């Protein structure tokens, strides 16, 4: 019995060590997959919410819903001259978008003039104008059922597309792509909302040149 205990205390055999490493690798991969699935679900949830809010904005334009701006009485409520829209911003952190009523004084969302109805914080995700990259702020508003005001850059196939991405420094990340609308041949906008999910890649910049003082010390 004593000899057997001494034998067991010698440590793991090579086979046992390889089995242990394999088990750890499997558990680690399961952990990574769970994190990715959680991020994927987060992107899908916010993309679907954003799509629902764009549909809501368009429904307000279609029904010509009146809005009571600040300083107006209920009887003075009007259909917003600039319609209803969605305003995307990367400041303040985190990225956020607003559903707003446009008073028509100036094109696009204007603080202190237009009025937001609701907003959604995007947590650790970022919103991107697909054709114009990280634009900072952009808007998409329906002045009527089929007419829009926007500073989102049109894609080559006349679509207005925004992307919801996880924030990464480099490598491959997950994203949701939302088509807000597209122009038809007669110049009117089709609110052809579509969602798609995939990945994107951020190139890692090469390391900067080493400090010359550090190089000298090494020589």
Image (cartoon, helix red, strand yellow):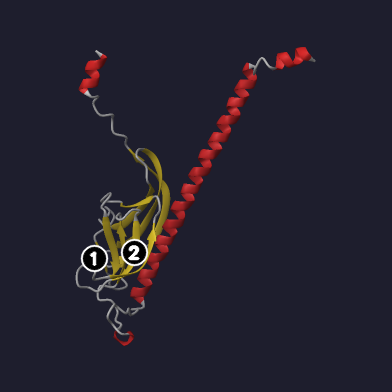
Q: In the image, is 113 to the left or to the right of 200?
A: left
Q: Is residue 1 above or below residue 136?
A: above
Nearest the camera: 109 or 61? 109
Q: Residue furthest right?
A: 1
**In the figure, residue 149 lies in which quadrant?**
bottom left
Where disc 1 sits, the SS reads loop
**Residue 133 % position (x, y):** 27, 49
Residue under the image location 33 percent in, 74 percent down: 61
Horizontal placement of 68 versus 34: left or right? left
Query: Mark on residue 98?
Result: 2
| Circle 2 Cα neighbour tier, 10 Å, few/some/many (<14 / 14–19 / ≥20) | many
Residue 191, percent across and down? Answer: 35, 65
Question: Which corner quadrant holds the C terminus?
Answer: top left
Q: Is residue 6 above or below residue 64?
A: above
Q: Which residue is farthest bottom?
A: 75
Say which of marks 2 and 1 sits in front.
2
Q: Quadrant of residue 147?
A: bottom left
**Measuring 27% from the left and 64% from the top, which residue is drawn there?**
185
Q: Is residue 5 left or right of residue 39?
A: right
Residue linked to disc 1: 108
Identify the residue at horizontal 28%, vertical 30% (top origin).
Answer: 206
Q: CA distance from mark 2 to mark 1?
A: 12 Å
Task: Indicate the position of residue 87 as horizontal and vertical percent values.
Answer: 30, 62
Q: Secondary structure at mark 2?
A: strand
Image coordinates of residue 193 in percent, x first then y, are 38, 61
Q: How many marks?
A: 2
Q: Nearer the viewer, residue 30 or 188?
A: 30
Q: Residue at x 39, y 69 (%)?
A: 56
């Amino acid at each position: 019995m004593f000899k057997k205990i001494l034998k067991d205390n010698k440590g793991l055999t090579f086979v046992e060590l390889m089995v242990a490493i394999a088990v750890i690798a499997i558990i680690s991969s399961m952990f990574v997959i769970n994190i990715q699935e959680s991020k994927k679900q987060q992107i899908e949830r916010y993309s679907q919410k954003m799509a629902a809010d764009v549909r809501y904005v368009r429904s307000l334009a279609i029904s010509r819903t009146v809005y009571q701006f600040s300083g107006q009485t209920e009887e003075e409520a009007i259909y917003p001259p600039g319609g209803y829209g969605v305003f995307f911003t990367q400041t303040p952190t985190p990225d956020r978008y607003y559903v707003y009523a446009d008073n028509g004084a100036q094109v696009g969302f204007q603080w202190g003039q237009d009025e937001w109805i609701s907003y959604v914080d995007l947590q650790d995700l970022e919103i991107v104008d697909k054709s114009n990259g990280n634009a900072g702020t952009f808007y998409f508003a329906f002045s009527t059922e089929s007419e829009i005001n926007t500073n989102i850059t049109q894609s080559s196939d006349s679509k207005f597309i925004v992307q919801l991405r996880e924030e990464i420094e480099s490598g491959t990340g997950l994203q949701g792509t939302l088509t807000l609308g597209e122009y038809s041949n007669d110049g009117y906008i089709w609110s052809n909302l579509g969602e798609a999910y995939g990945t994107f890649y951020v190139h890692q910049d090469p390391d900067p040149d080493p400090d010359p003082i550090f190089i000298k010390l090494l020589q």
